């Protein structure tokens, strides 16, 4: 399976300005993500997809493969689709650029999902820690018995009506796509649920395109706020 991993990287983030180049424990966020993905030896290519000249120059200085993409894209998936029009592959991975705890095991787990028969779109979940159960920045996912996603939400799902303390699952920012799924995504309008939750993967679900969800024991922390930066730095200190 010929696999290309794409890291969408915009500089114009709103909640944490310039976060792609923000230092996390002495290393820029984007560098941490790229190096984590690159450690997976089964990938044909890892490329940063950006609309920023500054990020492109940073990648060139570091020796990271990078391509300029349209500034009109509204989501990382649209940016991955543009890459799919110029770099051929069997599977395209979308590794969100704000995941500094990315490790090869995440990539291998996602590739295992994409090897399943008929899988067009795949992603990952991990058991949700107590700190993230009610955290709207940590997206929760519920799946059916076969592992396909039923819904993703920033709220806490499923609702624990009787105090049974269910196992909550956190969605991680890793996706796999076949080329046809990317074509479908960009040809569909932004969906109501996608717009409401600000979660691009809901466009697939709302249009009847299944997302197959693999599980990994390795949690990550997506960086959107100063609080997230401190949390990741503490985790990195504990790992060192």
Image (cartoon, grey):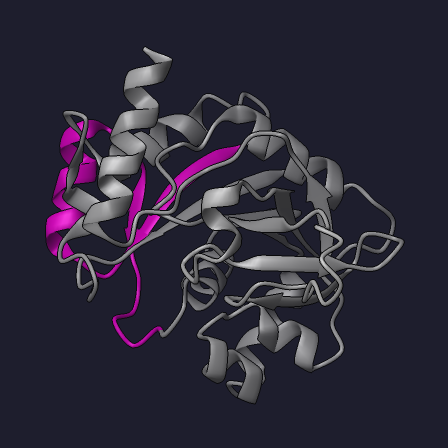
Depth check: 166 or 237 in front? 166
In the rendered view of the protein, which quadrant contains the N terminus? Answer: top right
Q: Is 207 displayed left or right of 203 in the figure?
A: right
Any part of residue 175 in sight:
no
- Could you tell me residue 69's position as x and y percent? 31, 62
**Residue shown at 40%/41% (left/top)?**
221
Magenta part of the chain: 44-73
| Quarter residue 128 falls in | top right
Whether residue 80 appears in magenta in the rendering, the answer is: no
Q: Position of residue 236 (x, y in %)?
A: 31, 22
Figure quadrant of residue 79? bottom left
Q: Is residue 52 magenta?
A: yes
Residue 148: x and y, percent?
79, 58
Judging depth in this view, the residue of 221 and 84 nearest the camera is: 221
Q: Is residue 75 visible?
A: yes
Q: Position of residue 75 (x, y in %)?
A: 40, 69
Q: Tell me how many marks there are.
A: 0
Q: Quadrant of the C terminus?
A: top left
**Residue furthest top in the image:** 240
Q: Residue at the location (59% across, 77% down)?
A: 203
Q: Is residue 146 left or right of residue 35?
A: right
Furthest residue in direction front, as rendered:
162
What residue lies at 50% left-to-right and 66% top-to-bottom? 154
x 83%, y 45%: residue: 116
State whether residue 57 is above or below residue 80: above
Taking the image as shown, residue 57 lies to the left or right of residue 128, namely left
In screen coordinates, is 51 left or right of 93? left
């Amino acid at each position: 399976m010929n696999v290309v991993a794409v890291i969408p990287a915009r500089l114009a983030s709103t909640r944490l300005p310039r976060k792609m180049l923000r230092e996390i424990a002495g290393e820029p966020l984007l560098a941490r993500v790229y190096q984590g993905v690159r450690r997976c030896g089964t990938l044909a290519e890892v490329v940063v997809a950006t609309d920023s000249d500054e990020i492109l120059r940073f990648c060139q200085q570091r020796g990271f493969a990078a391509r300029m993409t349209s500034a009109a894209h509204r989501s990382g998936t649209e940016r991955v689709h543009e890459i799919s029009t110029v770099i051929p592959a069997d599977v395209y991975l979308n590794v969100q650029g704000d995941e500094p705890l990315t490790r090869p095991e995440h990539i291998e787990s996602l590739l295992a999902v994409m090897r399943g028969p008929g899988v067009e779109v795949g992603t990952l979940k991990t058991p949700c820690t107590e700190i993230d159960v009610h955290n709207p920045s940590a997206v929760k996912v519920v799946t059916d018995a076969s592992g396909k996603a039923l819904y993703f939400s920033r709220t806490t799902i499923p609702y624990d009506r009787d105090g049974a303390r269910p196992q909550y699952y956190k969605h991680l920012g890793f996706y796999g796509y076949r080329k046809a799924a990317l074509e479908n995504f960009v040809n569909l309008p932004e969906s109501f649920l996608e717009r409401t939750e600000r979660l691009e993967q809901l466009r697939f679900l709302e249009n009847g395109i299944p997302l197959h969800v693999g599980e990994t024991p390795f949690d990550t922390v997506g960086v959107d706020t100063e609080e997230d930066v401190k949390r990741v730095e503490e985790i990195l200190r504990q790992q060192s």
